[in-house]
Image (tube, helix red, strand yellow):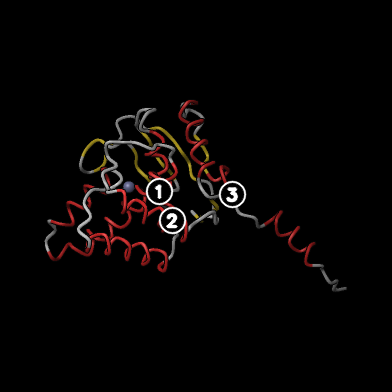
Amino acid sequence: MKREVAGSQLSALGSKTLKPRIGSQVTRFAAAFPAALRLCGEKCLRRLPPLTGAPIRIETVPNLRDRRGAVHAGSFLRQRRIAFNCTRTEFPRIFVHEVFHFVWLRAGNPLRRSWEALLKAELAAAARGELGWSAESHKVALATAEPRSVGRRWREYCCESFCDTGAWLYSGVSRHPEFTLAARFRARRRAWFECAIGKRELPV
Ligand SMILES: [Zn+2]
């Protein structure tokens, strides 16, 4: 016999079976991950809007490198894994930056286009500097890019500046030599994040 299921019962059932992982549960630190860094990462996660999605594995990898040489961290988006090889001092910024790579991937085109519009307005206003070396180096590469690689460079710059801005906002690091963007442009970025993201859940 078919039985009506009240809305509240339905959502209660749904919350048991379908509810995605949320907040700090989304990140799963490897057993060997240094405790001090883990505590630091968990502190950063509490500052972020709640994350939703399948677990992301957080691990340390000695001698981490990409095709250009040694790196502090690397995100493996399809494997849902972030590898670190950085100091305790640099960890908060780098950790939040890498988490934001997962946010960017799932941000959706309207949000990404809106971020691009903000950056275009900055460039039109001749804004110099950035909020991290990653974004800064991509901004420099964009300025000197050959015409055929401008599209790719632009997409890379948009992504890296989004991640560095997320790290600037949520890592708890208020001063850093790599924060070189002028105050008025920082204020616009903060306002954009408050409006576009606020405290809403972030799919990763
Ligand atoms: Zn990055």
Q: Eyeballing the image, is 198 above or below 29?
A: below
Task: Mark 3 vs mark 1: give the one in front.
Answer: 1
Please name the residue shown 40% across and 32% down the image: 60
The residue nearer to you, when weighing 80 against 177, is: 177
On the picture, is 19 further left or further right than 4? left
Q: Is the residue at mark 1 in contact range of ligand 1, meaning its CB lies under 8 Å from it? A: no
Mark earlier in primary sequence (3, 2): 3
Q: Which amino acid type is marked by label 3? A: Ile
The residue nearer to you, when weighing 64 against 156, is: 156
Mark earlier in primary sequence (3, 1): 3
Residue hosting label 1: 166
Residue hosting label 2: 193
Task: Mark 1 vs mark 2: give the one in front.
Answer: 2
Task: Give x and y (percent) for residue 126.
Answer: 19, 58
Q: Which amino acid type is marked by label 2? A: Phe
In what element is the residue under mark 2?
Answer: helix
Please name the residue shown 30% across and 46% down the image: 131
Q: Is the residue at mark 2 in contact range of ligand 1, meaning its CB lies under 8 Å from it? A: no
In what element is the residue under mark 1?
Answer: helix
Task: Mark 3 vs mark 2: give the one in front.
Answer: 2
